[in-house]
Image: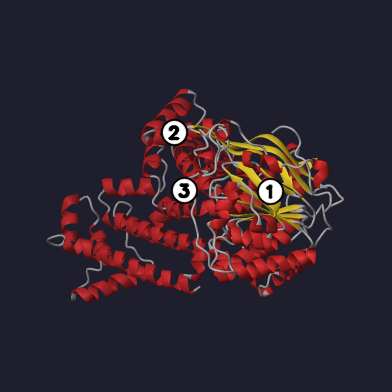
Amino acid sequence: MRFILRRLGFYLIALLVSVTLNFMIPRLMSGDPVQLMFARFQGRMDPRAIESLYETFGFVQGPLHEQYFTYLSHLLQGDLGVSIANFPIPVTEVIAVGLGWTLRLVGLATVIAFSAGIFLGIRAAWRRGRFADSVILPITGLLSAFPYFWLAMLVLYFFALGLGWFPLGHAYSLDIHQDWSSPEYLSSVLHHMILPATTIVLTAIGGWMLGMRNNMISVLSEDYITMAQAKGLSDRRVMYTYAARNAILPSLTGFAMSLGFVLGGALLTEIVFSYPGVGYTLLTAVNTRDYPLMQGVFLMITVAVLVANLLADTMYVLLDPRVRAA
Amino acid sequence: MTQPMPTFDQARTDAEPLLSVRDLVVEYHTQRGLVRAADHVSFDLHRNEVFGLAGESGCGKSTVAHAITRILKPPAHIAGGQVLFDEVDVLKLNDDQLRDIRWRRISIVFQSAMNALSPVLTVGTQIADALQAHENGTAQMTRRQVLDRARELLDLVGIDPDRVNSYPHQLSGGMRQRVVIAIALALNPELIVMDEPTTALDVVVQKQIMDQIRELRNQFGFSILFISHDLSLMVEFSDRVGIMYAGELVEVAPSQAIFNDPQHPYTVRLMNSFPTLSGPRVELFGIPGSPPDLITPPPGCRFHPRCDVALAGRCQTERPGLQPIGARHMAACHLLDDKIVNKEDAS
């Protein structure tokens, strides 16, 4: 418990630092960033947006520390300002929509890739040189070495454009009413998810599998594995409770960290498949120079990575008793 | 070497031996070639007996122990021989039959207790595992009974039963070794193979643990196959001792005979190279040279290049076999030919 509290303290400090950086960066630009931005839009920006921009950045009249605290208090209230491109929709709302799609697509794909990779890695190490080890492992390794966008476009070209089995993009058919309780809508969402999710799983699985296999192999040579076998335990028990339980620890840290990056969206996936997730939102924000939105997305990614790290630490404590004493 | 080894223990035991190893051959496939780590090793172990296997590092004693319990890992493999446990050949058992006798009838205490316990499971879980894996063999046990038994076992080896919820890293080396012994006792096995059970521990803890093992053996009456390179410990602890050199058994005798009246030149030199725990100070001698490369072992007697009494000719060309040279005493040396007795005389 003390360990987790100490980690928590560390992450709070890291959060404060990143928030402060977020606050400082617009102020490091020479001149008034809001005026600069406004000028760049050359009259295409709603004048009312200027007010909200000033507020977003905490540009209130007064000394720097006052501005800083205004900015912090806005953050604490969950106020990230208003999106310029989508004026007057608040940044939080724009992100929330994208986040929903990203979590469903990238989150699900990451969990599937991790579970499948770990499982295959266990099998490959347990039966070295057999099917999982000598056939599946090289294939997944090859897939993860593909340039992602190329694989994604290839898949899109053949299965969506060529064969027409799957839609070309977006998260659901636009002619279906958006209603989560309607089975028609759900199946449309799933149908749109299959291609992008498959490409993510295919490219990610190799890394998890190889990592787990290698950890497993070194754990399998430990005396406690031999002893577990000599105890007459079933292969399943030895493989999962004794070997995998020890071998999975490093992979779990990687997994928790990758969950943090999930929230950042899979940029390439969302671009190739025009999937309206966080990555796509970020791309749009950059294209339209929507600074509040960009800042909001960056802040969210920072927080997500920090939370994921904390999650990794907590998980480690739960799974590895040796860390608890530290 | 292929004819059955004569038995000399009829005086001592009327029954069949509990464990009978016959012409066991274990080979390692290495990049440089085939290594015969155990070459036609044969010995018997009786009920209630402590049989010790001693020898320098790399002589094959652990290989033999691992072959008997079938926990050898590639590139090692058993190339021949029999391991009769209660008249059943362990080497011929299928996986299910093997799983059934493992721990319930033969358990193992590993060389390094530091690594014999999984770091992420509590001591209790690792004891319970052994009990529950064999539920079918013993009585059905409830979770509560399993836990009670685990506490009881810890108490037996002198550890506070409340330690059942501890993780291995929370225990000292000596305590971990005791836990490993407790796990080995869990199902009241008939044979416990102890592979250097105290090598990683300091001498004081070693003594405590050996005393504990002796006490437990008196209480439960299991047999022990004891592997050690520590001859003084071995002679003190075992009923009979087998000395191994370069993959072969070169002498088998009651430990008193090994201690007082070693016959094989290697055993003699080995005894001279060890200090005794008690007794007068004597000058110690090493054995010149080093054990042979087992990929290309020397022809004839494998010890002849290091042997100062080797005969030119015969010792260099003809391999000696284990021969009876006295009551319950066997050795493999051409120089002892005149002492060979036949079976009838010995019994």
Name the amino acid, label 2. Answer: Leu
> Residue A147 location, x and y as percent?
36, 34
- The answer for which chain carries disc 2 is A
In the image, residue B175 above or below residue A100: below
Residue position marked by numbered label 1 in the rendering: B252
Q: Give the mark toward the camera: 3 or 2.
A: 3
Q: CA distance from mark 1 to mark 3?
A: 23 Å
- Determine the residue positioned at 40% across, 42% down: A270
Count the numbered circles shown: 3
Residue A143, numbered label = 2
Residue B288, numbered label = 3
- The answer for which chain carries disc 3 is B
> Residue B227 location, x and y as percent?
63, 54
Q: Secondary structure at mark 3?
A: loop
Foreground pick, B56 / A13: B56
> Residue A290 location, x and y as percent?
27, 53
Foreground pick, B280 / B155: B280
Q: Is residue B336 visible?
A: yes
